């Protein structure tokens, strides 16, 4: 599970940034006092417009960056004190595909599996399962540079899942993908829930959120604007649609 | 874990055509190609200069004593065509300006009388010195005529030429061929591997750090349970290996050129050079190159980590080449020798130590100082790289 409490993140401002923002402050706040938790067997969605602070929160969860204050717990591990231990439990899909263009899908998956110390037998099993699920067998030996965006995203997801993590974090996993590819990724997220994994994904596609989410949090300007179950969100809806409600919350 | 990262990064780098070009192909082929072209061009120029029929304008008449002597010089000293101007100096000068003449011979109109009277006369050769071979041709013509006239005077004055020479002087070179080679080529050799080592490190450093930031792959890598320092070391090893490969490729290319392209006409010198390539020499050279390349990598990595785009990194690192070459060039100056002071100057110490290694007169105390200084520089640079790589504002775009 993921548990974050009173999370703050400030970034230092350089001269140019101070000029742009017309401020003399040394730091800019990206995340302010955010707390929520995601449970195993649950799909949790982090929503927010561009620049809301979603990616910053996900990066802190994956321990790529450290929070200015607050606490993060991943499967009971203090992720700030023991980031490497926490990373073993996480599968993190970044916003970009983040793949090596000169390597093949096979080579990338093998490489990341080796970094997670995945035993050979498990690697074979996981590769077979994920390649079949994501329909990757046809292009697994091709170099990444020659693949389409959808194919690359499948490889990225496979890379994220290869070590069978307990916590899966997806940063806009279906962004820029065609419907068929997006559907296979949505199916994978459902499978993760069925396998009792903790799934956290950020998105701004309300249809996807409606389809998958058990609980959601809405972030705007680094602050938590809404946090609760999807059922509650639907029940208290004042707008005509989920998108309308999302806009209402963000603008309130 | 470091080896896993190193292996993957090496595979990725080897598949990058641009890096391979800078790391192996250019250093390996540059010298054979360059030397072949230079030798070919200079030989053809020398041949054409020797066989060219020079048009020599003379101020006087073809019947003048000096002109006759000039005409009598055999063709084997270079073919020529003599054109007399019968005192028309203006036309003579204009024709030279219009490039109708290659050489002009001015002489005293009383030259024949002066020679007969055993007086000193004068002649002037005028030519465009930028033209290859003109000066040599004028000198050789003059020498032939002058020697003949001098011997005539010895005879007329009844002087034994040998009595005019108080003693013979022999300047004997006590330096061995290897020492000579160290002095002549010793500075040039490290200059090559410094330049290529730097170039060889540059592209992998930018690609493995700035490139990864640009492509977003660094973030993916940082989410794995691998220590950051291990990622840094794994990547740096590839940068260092690329620099070493580029340096050694350039040296292999150079030795190949010496061995097979007749770059050095003296076979003794060629055998000295090839004999120099002992395992001991190569090991010593490797131990000098290793900290140097680590130092280069250590300079480039923090810059690559800090910069946001490939272009930005390239625009900062590429001009640094001059800063690296500058101390290397100081080592080429005559009189600059390896001592405690110069052994403490990074890069310059490498040039001077290599020079001594080639000359075979290395002082092992100074070699150790050089190695330690470079080791300290490399260690400092790696430490700075580690600090920069640890900063989250640097590693994410």
Image (spheres, coloured by chain):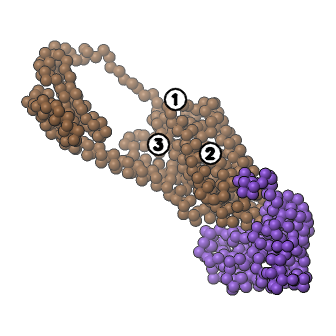
Chain colours: A purple, B brown
Mark 3 or 2: the one toward you: 2
In the rendered structure, which disc, 1 or 3, sits on the residue that comes first in sequence?
Answer: 3
Q: Chain of mark 2?
A: B
> Is disc 2 placed on a helix, strand or loop?
helix
Quarter of the image with the C terminus of chain B is bottom right
Quarter of the image with the N terminus of chain B is bottom right
> Are labels 1 and 3 on one chain?
yes
> Where is residue B309 drawn, in percent x and y?
63, 59
Q: Residues within 10 Å of mark 2 (few under 14, many from 20)?
A: many
Mark 1 or 3: the one toward you: 1
Marker disc for residue B272: none
Marker disc for residue B292: 2
* Res A136 quadrant in image: bottom right
The answer to whether residue B170 is left or right of residue A26 is: left
Q: Chain of mark 3?
A: B
> Where is residue A106 drawn, in percent x and y?
67, 74
In this orientation, which residue lies closer to the viewer: B374 or A25? Answer: A25
Q: Residues within 10 Å of mark 3 (few under 14, many from 20)?
A: some
In the rendered structure, which disc, 3 or 2, sits on the residue that comes first in sequence?
Answer: 3
Q: Say which residue label 3 marks.
A: B273
Q: Is residue B361 above or below residue A48?
A: above
> Where is residue B217 drawn, in percent x and y?
69, 66
Q: Say which residue label 1 marks.
A: B335
Q: Residue at x 71, y 82 (%)?
A: A182
> Where is residue A105 drawn, in percent x and y?
66, 74
Q: Is residue B70 above or below residue B224?
A: above
Q: Residue furthest left?
A: B63
> Are labels 2 and 1 on one chain?
yes
* Res B216 quadrant in image: bottom right
């Amino acid at each position: 599970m993921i548990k974050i409490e009173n999370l703050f993140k400030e970034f230092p401002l350089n001269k140019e940034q101070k000029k742009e923002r017309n401020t003399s402050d040394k730091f800019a706040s990206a995340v302010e006092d955010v707390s929520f938790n995601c449970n195993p067997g649950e799909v949790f969605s982090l929503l927010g417009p561009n620049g809301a602070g979603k990616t910053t929160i996900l990066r802190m969860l994956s321990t790529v960056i450290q929070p200015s204050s607050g606490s993060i717990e991943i499967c009971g591990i203090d992720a700030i004190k023991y980031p490497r231990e926490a990373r073993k439990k996480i599968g993190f899909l970044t916003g970009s595909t983040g793949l090596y263009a000169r390597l093949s899908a096979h080579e990338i998956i093998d490489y990341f599996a080796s970094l997670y110390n995945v035993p050979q037998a498990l690697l074979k099993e996981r590769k077979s399962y994920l390649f079949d699920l994501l329909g990757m067998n046809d292009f697994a030996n091709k170099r990444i540079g020659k693949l389409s965006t959808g194919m690359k995203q499948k490889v990225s997801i496979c890379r994220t899942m290869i070590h069978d993590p307990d916590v899966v974090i997806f940063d806009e996993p279906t962004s820029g993908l065609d419907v068929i590819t997006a559907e296979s990724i949505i199916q994978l997220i459902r499978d993760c829930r069925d396998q009792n994994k903790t799934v956290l994904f950020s998105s701004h596609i309300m249809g996807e959120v409606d389809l998958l989410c058990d609980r959601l949090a809405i972030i705007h300007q680094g602050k938590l604007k809404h946090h609760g179950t999807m059922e509650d969100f639907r029940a208290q809806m004042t707008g005509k649609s989920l998108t309308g409600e999302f806009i209402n919350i963000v603008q309130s | 874990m470091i080896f896993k990262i190193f292996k993957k990064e090496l595979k990725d780098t080897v598949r990058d055509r641009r890096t391979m070009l800078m790391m192996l192909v250019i250093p390996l082929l540059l010298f054979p190609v360059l030397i072949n072209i230079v030798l070919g061009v200079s030989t053809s120029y020398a041949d054409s200069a020797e066989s060219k029929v020079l048009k020599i304008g003379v101020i006087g008449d073809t019947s003048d004593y000096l002109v006759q002597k000039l005409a009598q010089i055999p063709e084997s000293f270079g073919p020529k065509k003599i054109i007399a101007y019968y005192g028309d100096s203006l036309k003579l000068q204009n024709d030279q300006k219009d490039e109708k003449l290659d050489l002009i011979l001015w002489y005293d109109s009383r030259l024949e009388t002066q020679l007969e009277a055993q007086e000193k006369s004068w002649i002037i050769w005028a030519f465009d010195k930028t033209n290859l071979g003109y000066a040599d041709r004028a000198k050789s013509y003059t020498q032939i005529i002058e020697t003949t006239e001098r011997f005539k005077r010895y005879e007329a004055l009844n002087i034994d030429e040998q009595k005019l020479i108080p003693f013979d002087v022999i300047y004997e070179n006590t330096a061995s061929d290897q020492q000579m080679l160290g002095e002549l080529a010793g500075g040039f050799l490290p200059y090559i591997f410094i330049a290529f080592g730097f170039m060889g490190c540059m592209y992998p450093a930018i690609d493995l750090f700035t490139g990864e930031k640009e492509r977003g792959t660094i973030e993916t890598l940082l989410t794995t349970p691998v220590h950051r320092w291990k990622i840094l070391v794994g990547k740096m090893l590839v940068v260092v290996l690329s620099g070493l490969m580029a340096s050694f490729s350039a040296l292999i290319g150079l030795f190949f050129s010496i061995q097979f392209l007749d770059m050095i006409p003296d076979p003794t010198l060629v055998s000295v050079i090839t004999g120099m390539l002992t395992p001991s020499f190569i090991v010593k050279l490797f131990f000098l190159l290793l900290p140097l390349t680590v130092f280069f990598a250590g300079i480039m990595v923090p810059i690559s980590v800090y910069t946001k785009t490939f272009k930005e990194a390239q625009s900062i690192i590429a001009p640094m080449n001059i800063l690296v070459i500058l101390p290397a060039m100081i080592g080429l100056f005559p009189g600059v020798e390896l001592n405690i002071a110069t052994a403490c100057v990074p890069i310059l110490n490498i040039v001077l130590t290599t020079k001594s290694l080639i000359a075979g007169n290395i002082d092992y105390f100074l070699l150790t100082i050089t190695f330690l200084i470079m080791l300290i520089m490399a260690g400092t640079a790696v430490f700075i790289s580690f600090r920069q790589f640890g900063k989250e504002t640097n590693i994410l775009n």
